[in-house]
Image (cartoon, rainbow, N blue to C red):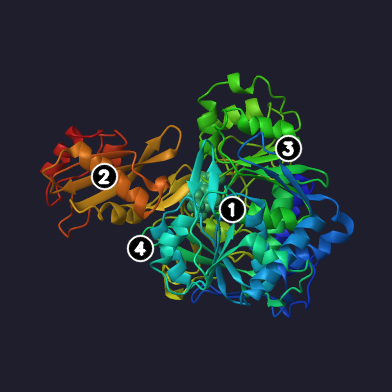
Amino acid sequence: MQRINSLSEYFKKYELSEKNPESFWSEIADSFTWKKKWDKVLDWDFENVSINWFQNAKLNITENIFERNLKERGDKTAIIWEPNDPNESPIHLTYKKLYEETCRFSNALRSKGIKKGDRVIIYMPMVPEAAIAMLACARVGAVHSVVFAGFSSTSLADRINDCQAKMVLTSDGNFRGSKTIPVKSVVDEALEKCSTIESVIVLERTKQAVEMFEGRDFWWHDCVSEETNICDAEVLDSEDMLFILYTSGSTGKPKGVVHSSAGYMVYSAYTFQNVFQYDENDIYWCTADVGWITGHSYIVYGPLLCGATTVMFEGVPTFPNVSRFWDIVDKFKINQFYTAPTAIRALQAHGLEPLKNNSLESLKVIGSVGEPINEEAWHWYHDNIGKGNCPLVDTWWQTETGGIMISALAGITPNKPAHASLPLPGIHPVIVDPEGNELVGNNVQGNLCIKFPWPSIIRTTYGDHQRCINTYFSNYKGMYFTGDGVKRDHDGYLRILGRVDDVINVSGHRMGTAEVENAINEHEEVIESAVVGYPHDIKGEGIYAYVIINSQSSDDKVKGEIVDVVRRVIGPIAKPDKIQIVSGLPKTRSGKIMRRILRKVASNDFGNLGDTSTLLNPDVVEEIINGAN
Ligand code: PRX
C-alpha cells in the first residue's frame, strides 16, 4: 500500500491527484489483487449521480484481505477481541484462522440459499463473529447491512423492509457493562412486521433463553459444524454493491447509503494506511461499534486490507471502571488509538485519577472521529493520553464518504487543535456561500462541498436513487454537499463547524430531528413536537424537544412516557435530554416552525432571537422562554 512519508510528499501527491486523478488512483489500485483489471479508472456524472470507478474490473474484497495477505501474514494476528468482562480471556484470531472461519461461515450462508446480491442484515454485538459475518457476506457477494444492536425492533424492521433482506444474523444477547441485553427477542419482534426474511442465524453469546422458530431460526454453531474451511470467492464487478448502511438525514426515514466493492476497498485501505501511518507490527484499536461506518471502514475493512492487527472491544468505557480504555491500551500495547470526542469528554470529567496506574507508553498516534472536538477536550486528550508527543488525527468524514476525507496524516501534517486540517490526496473540498458561490482563499467560512468524486463516494440510496440526487447533489450544482459548515483559517487549515441542516450529532451519533419528532408524535397525547440540538458538555449536542400535548395528566408523567416511546421506536440513543411542554410552537405565516428561535432558547441564548414580528404567533416565544429548561 502506497504510503506518504513527508509533508512535501503529501503536497506532491495532492497536486498529482488534482492534475491527474486517474493516474493517481490507478497507481494506488495497482497494489490490490484483481481478477480482471479496469478498462477505465473513472467515469462520472454528478447530475444523475452515475459514478463508476475502476470500470469493468473484477474482484472480491475478501481475496484482498485473505489470499493477498495469507502468505506473509498467515500467522499474524488479524483481530484481537477484548470481551466486556475483563476476567474473560481475549481472543487472538490469526489471518489464517479468520480466513478459515470466514470460509466456513460463507459456506453456511450459501447452504442457506444466500447468493450474490441478496441482502443480509447483521444485528450483532461486538464479537469477532460480527466481522466474520460481514466478511462472509462479502465473500459470497451478498450485500450486508449492519444495524447497530442498540436500535429498537421498529428501527430494525424498517431497515429489513427497506432493503428487502432475506436473512438476519444475530445473537442470543449482548453483554454491555453490567447489563445483559436481549438481542434475539428484538429480532423476533421486528420480524412480526417483515415478510422477506427466510432465515435467522443466531450466535450463542450470553446463553440466555431464546425462542427458536422451527424452519426459520438456526444456531450459528450448528450451521458451521458441517462446513469446510475453504470457500471460493464470488467474482464481483467493481461497482457491485458491497454493503448498505442506514443513516439519518434532515427528512424522512433513515436512508440506505450504498457502497460498492472496488472503490470502497481502495479508499478504506489507502486512508487507513496513511492517516494512521500503520507500521507492520503495530496494534491498532478503534473503539467504534461495527454498526457505524467507522466500524466498517476502520475496524474491519481498512485495517484487514492492510494486513494490520485490529482490536475489537465488546464493552463500554466505564465498565468495570473508568480506567477500562486505558487498561486495554496497556494490556495489548496499543499503538494507534481511535475514538470519539464524547468518550474523551466523558473520561476527562473523571480527572486524572483513573489514569494513575496506566503507562500508555505504547501509543504512537491518537485519533478522533464523529463530531467536532472542542479545544479543551483536544488538549486533554493530547496532553494526558498522547502525553504531548503523539500526533492527534482529527478525522472528518461521513457514512456517505466511506472513508476519511479531511485529516492530518499522523506525524506528517502539523497538528492544530480542533482542526481536521487538510484534505487527503484525491479529495477536493470547496467552501460555498448559500448561493453556491465558491469562497476562495483563506479566512472564509461556509458550507462544505466536494467537487470531484473519490473512490468510496456514495453510489445511491438503496431503492430510491432520486433521493440520493436530491439530498446530496442538488443543493449546489455539480458538487456533493456534505451538510456540514466549515471554516478555512489563515493557514488554509479546515475546521469543521458542525451540521448546517436539521441533523443533530449526539455523542457522535447522527440523528434527524424529524425522525425523533415522528417518534415523539407516536405518543397518543402528543399533538405536535419540534426537536432541536443544544450544546451539551459531554455529548456535544443534546436533544431538546418542545412538545404540545392535549393531556390532562401531569407534565412529568407525559415526559417520562415520551422518553419511553422514543426508546421503543428508535432506541435509547435518541431519547430526549430535555422536554419542554408548550402550548404552541413559533411558526411563520406559511406554517413553518421557526427552528432558529427554538435552537436559541434551547441553548439559553435569549439575547438575540432575531426578528419575531413575522411570526404567526409571536406571543408563544415569551411563553417558551419563560418555561425553558
Ligand atoms: O457533522 C459531521 C460529523 O459527523 C457527521 C457524519 O456522521 P456519520 O455519517 O454518522 O459518520 C460519523 C463517522 C465518520 C458529519 O457530517 N463529523 C464526523 N467526523 C467529524 C465530524 N465533525 C467534526 N469533526 C470530525 N472529525
Q: Which residue is mark 3?
A: 334
- The residue mark sitting in front, 4 or 1, is 1
Q: Are marks 3 and 4 in contact (CB under 8 Å)?
A: no
Q: Secondary structure at mark 2?
A: helix
The residue type indicated by label 1 comes to Val
Instruction: Report the Cα–Cα distance between label 4 and label 1.
Output: 24 Å
Disc 4 residue crowd, few under 14, some 14–19, many 20+, Cα 10 Å: few
Residue bearing mark 2? 561
Query: Toward the viewer: 78 or 283?
Result: 78
Judge left or right: residue 323 versus residue 74.
left
> Label 4: which residue?
252
Q: Nearer the viewer, mark 2 or mark 3?
A: 2
User: Which of the numbered marks, if any, corresponds to residue 290?
Assistant: 1
Query: In x, y percent, where is residue 345?
Result: 51, 32
Q: Position of residue 112 (x, y in %)?
A: 62, 74
Which amino acid is tagged 3?
A: Ile
Element on which disc 1 rests:
loop
Label 4's element?
loop
- Mark 2 or 1, which is nearer the eye? 2
Q: CA distance from mark 2 to mark 3?
A: 43 Å
Q: Earlier in the sequence, mark 1 or mark 3?
A: 1
The quadrant in which the C terminus is found is top left
Position of 159 with respect to 625 (left or right) is: right
The residue lying at 52 percent from left, 28 percent from top is: 376
Separation of residues labelled 3 and 4 (CA atoms): 41 Å
The numbered mark, 3 or 4, whose residue comes first in the sequence reads: 4
